[in-house]
Image (cartoon, rainbow, N blue to C red):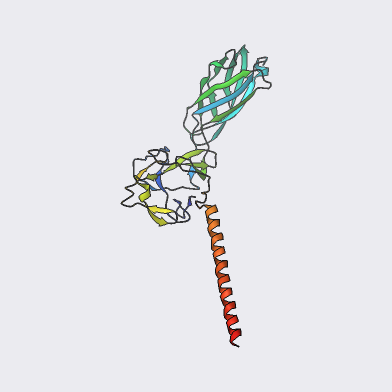
Amino acid sequence: AFDLGIDGTLVNPSSGLHVMGWQANPLTGKIDTTVPATNITIPIGAGMTGKASTSLTADGNLDANNAGGALNAVNLSSTVYDSQGNAIPLTLTFTKSAANTWSVAPSTTDPGVTVTGTSTIVFNGSGKVATGGTGTLSLTLTNGSTSPQSVTLDMSQITQLASTPSSLSSSTDGASAGSLTTFTVGQAGDITGVYSNGYKQPLGQIALASFSNPSGLSKAGGNLFAASANSGTPNIGTPDAGGRGQIATGFLEGSNVDLAQQFTNMIMAERGFQANSRVITTSDEILQDLVNLKH
């Protein structure tokens, strides 16, 4: 298992040895695996600036039996974020204007924001989107953040089926400001940071080494092995590539001892000890008899 050292680097807690790999660019999240591997730092508690929303995805179902008109409109409440991480409440109003046809109008209750970008969705006979599955929202902001802000609206997964009431949900790629609370490690050695605002961002990549002759590695103790002349030079790269194995996360390594064989050895040792004890006891009794005969 890996843990954090006092300097914030990823280490093996049993040996204190550092886990080597590549650090992600804190601004772009990109990882360059062509440079030499170094210690990996996990900045727990470090903050991240807000991420502006560039997309808003709506899905769910609109009731095919909706009577239409403003009185029967369906509202979807959502939230997007500006470049400073401020949350902006949005409402998408779906109004049925004709058979299989719905208009979509955005609005907001934030007095410092103006939003435009109406759309029209047309469904086919199977209740799936035929046209109008995407649109663009334009937000004009007066709080000093980047303006205007363009948000792509994806409605391609919405269906129109006979189901009362209509049920819609949404998600966005934006986030408010937050701090790093924990991290996860994937099978490919990718380290992902989880922030208090729910946002996830790459932090680094663990390196793995393969050898042309693994049997030639020399034992260093503590489940550690060192390269030798027989093992060849290490081929360092990303896990699950180039013949290198995967990283198992959330697992506890099982014992590599044959329990049946060890129990057999223990019983044999116990029986041997008992036999030797009886030999000593018998010898003592014979000597005692000899002493008694002398007297």
Q: Does residue 134 lie above or below 49 as drawn?
A: above
Q: Position of residue 104 (x, y in %)?
A: 58, 19
Provide residue 231's location: percent of width, then percent of height.
Answer: 34, 49
Which residue is located at x 57 percent, y 23 percent?
Answer: 106
Q: How many numbered tags mark residues here?
A: 0
- Residue at the image position 56 percent from the left and 30 percent from the top: 171
Residue found at the far front of this picture:
293
Vertically, is 107 above or below 100? below
Q: Report the front residue among 127 and 25.
A: 127
Camera-nearest residue between 110 and 2: 2
Q: Find residue 263 and report its image quarter.
A: bottom right
Question: Outermost residue, top direction?
Answer: 99
Q: Residue furthest left?
A: 229
| Residue positioned 58% across, 74% down in the render | 282
Residue closer to the observer: 227 or 95 = 227
Q: Nearer the viewer, residue 150 or 125?
A: 125
Report the side of 238 relative to 77 (left or right): left
User: Residue 275 in the image: x percent, y percent?
Assistant: 56, 67
Q: Quadrant of the C terminus?
A: bottom right
